Image (cartoon, coloured by chain):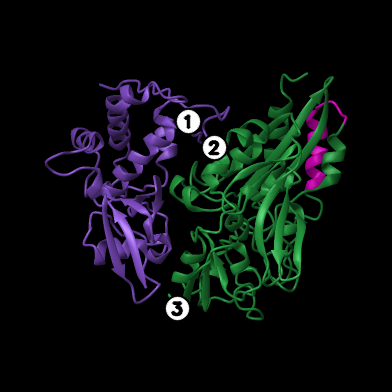
Chain colours: A purple, B green
Amino acid sequence: MDVTLTVNGAQQTLQLDDPRVSLLDALRQRLDLTGTKKGCDHGQCGACTVIVNGRRINSCLTLAVMHDGDEITTIEGIGTPDNLAPLQRAFIKHDGFQCGYCTPGQIVSATAMLEELRQGWPSQLTGDLGAADLTDEEIRERMSGNICRCSCYPNIVDAIRDAAGETGSQAGGQPGARLAAEGAA
Amino acid sequence: MRQFDYSRAASPADAIGTDARIIAGGTNLLDLMKLQVETPDRLIDVNHVGLDRIERDGDGVRIGALVRNADCAADETVRRDWPLLSHAILAGASPQLRNRASTGGNLMQRTRCYYFYDLDAPCNKREPGSGCGAIGGINRIHAILGASESCIATYPGDMAVAMSALDAVVEVEGPNGRRDIPATEFHRLPGDTPERDNTLEPGEMILSVRLPAPLGGRHIYRKVRDRRSYAFALVSVAAVVAMDGGRMSNVRLAFGGVAHKPWRVPEAEALLEGQAPAPDLFDRAAEAVLDGARGQGHNDFKIPLLRRTLSAVLAEATEGAE
């Protein structure tokens, strides 16, 4: 069966002879996009996070055949070594990793998380379900789907807060966005 | 994962009345298929059949089966009129999972009992007649209410607990037409057929969940668990309480993590209805909820935990309200 995916802006058609191929394995093994990592392969660690049609999901818990016609952004589409995204720069600046295995998932997840915040999505910490401020607690809660076994969490939170401040001026005018970004540079 | 045939449904009719297993978000089903706990021969993908809107229905709303959990929780109308549902959904899983998991699929998610997941262990739910590893085994997360000698598994979700409290109705369609199932009757007790999680019949598909008119009042979903985020409930309490002249009204309570289905006890709600809030009254309501409760050893703590959590929730719901 043919599956056409638009990955990081480029349309690609894959011939799959087995419907069991996860989106994660299709990206890594068929498209050689190995930035997306396989951690637990059961949706628990977040290392495989990609953005599909604007939403962050676990690519290990979905079949490639289910995504015919979908638009996918992987870490390779977020930034490149020559042109780092603000979150990538912030992770380097704040030392937001040790082994680095979870980092692509963290950065892809945080990219989508900041967009969710701009759209005014609540979290379980958002008591009145209104628009949330980007407090450290909200960052931790909204990033709970990404595990870091080196436990670099404090620096990851610092990096995300910093990067959100950098892009906050673009988001500030949009409804629901109240990026406090306290302590941001 | 075992081999299976895959097809994509263009409309609900393609999936209704077939013996294929319906896949929506797939966040639970594919996990179980990787472990070979689930081994369907055929999958039918319903992600493109529509049913992905939240629409007005009289004074209530109709939530399509394919509405993603994240969209349901963030919906302006749900947030305003049924905040209990938003709170419950946001208390569950991770953002990535909520972006993918659907309303119908969330209702269909299976227990997280360790023995259900372990192919080497006996489990009457996975393999009827093989026994129950949890009874007399490690049973910290298991049921204290409504369990049977065949199965002490719990329904693990949060969304359905809120839906039970809100008197939601699950709209399904099968080969013999459409029918409504009250959310409180969608999941079932295990009895001697724990392989059946719910009352959906073969060939039926969930089309939507209907929420009746808003109840007003305060909505609280309190989930007690081992980790602050991204963990299943040990005990959860869904509560709606309005205050009228210093007395409680429109009381709705439902409990998660304690039984094979969201647990609702109308007698406990009736004890509170029309009464002024008081700690001893909260205790009596908890006693009514816990009527017949029985620990399995490791989960004995859930009995006092439920009592205390309910008291705390009722105190919060009524504090400072007139």
Closer to the camera in the image, A23 or B255: A23
Q: Tell me whether marks 1 and 3 sit on the same chain.
A: no
- Residue B147: image location, x then y, percent: 73, 63
Residue occupying the point 35% across, 66% down: A3
Label 1 is placed on what type of residue?
Answer: Gly
| Alpha carbons under labels 1 and 3: distance apart | 41 Å
Residue positioned 72% across, 19% down in the render? B320
Q: Which residues are magenta?
A: B274-289
| Image quarter hosting the N terminus of chain B | bottom left
- Residue B235 position, x and y percent, is 64, 47
Within 10 Å of disc 3 (Cα), the crowding (few <14, some 14-19, many 20+) is: few
Q: Which mark is residue B69?
A: none
Question: Is B14 in the magenta?
Answer: no
Respond whether the residues carrying marks 1 and 2 are from the same subunit: no
Q: Quadrant of residue B82?
A: top right
* Numbered circle sitting on residue B74: 2
* Circle 3 chain: B
Q: Residues within 10 Å of mark 1 (few under 14, many from 20)?
A: many
Amino acid type of the residue tagged 3 in the rendering? Arg
Mark nearer the viewer, 2 or 3: 2
Asked if A73 appears above or below B250 in the picture, the reply is below
Task: Work out which quarter of the rendered image holds the C terminus of chain B and state it.
Answer: top right
Q: Disc 3 marks which residue?
A: B2
Please indicate whether residue B282 sits to the left or right of residue A150 in the image: right
Is residue A99 rendered to the left or right of residue B322? left
Q: Would you say the residues marked 1 and 2 are in contact, meaning their CB atoms lie under 8 Å apart?
A: yes
The residue lying toward the viewer, choosing from A125 and A64, is A64
Residue at the farthest left position = A82
Residue A120: numbered disc? 1
Q: Chain of mark 2?
A: B
Whether discs 2 and 3 lie on one chain: the answer is: yes
Q: State the predominant SS element of the stretch in magenta.
A: helix
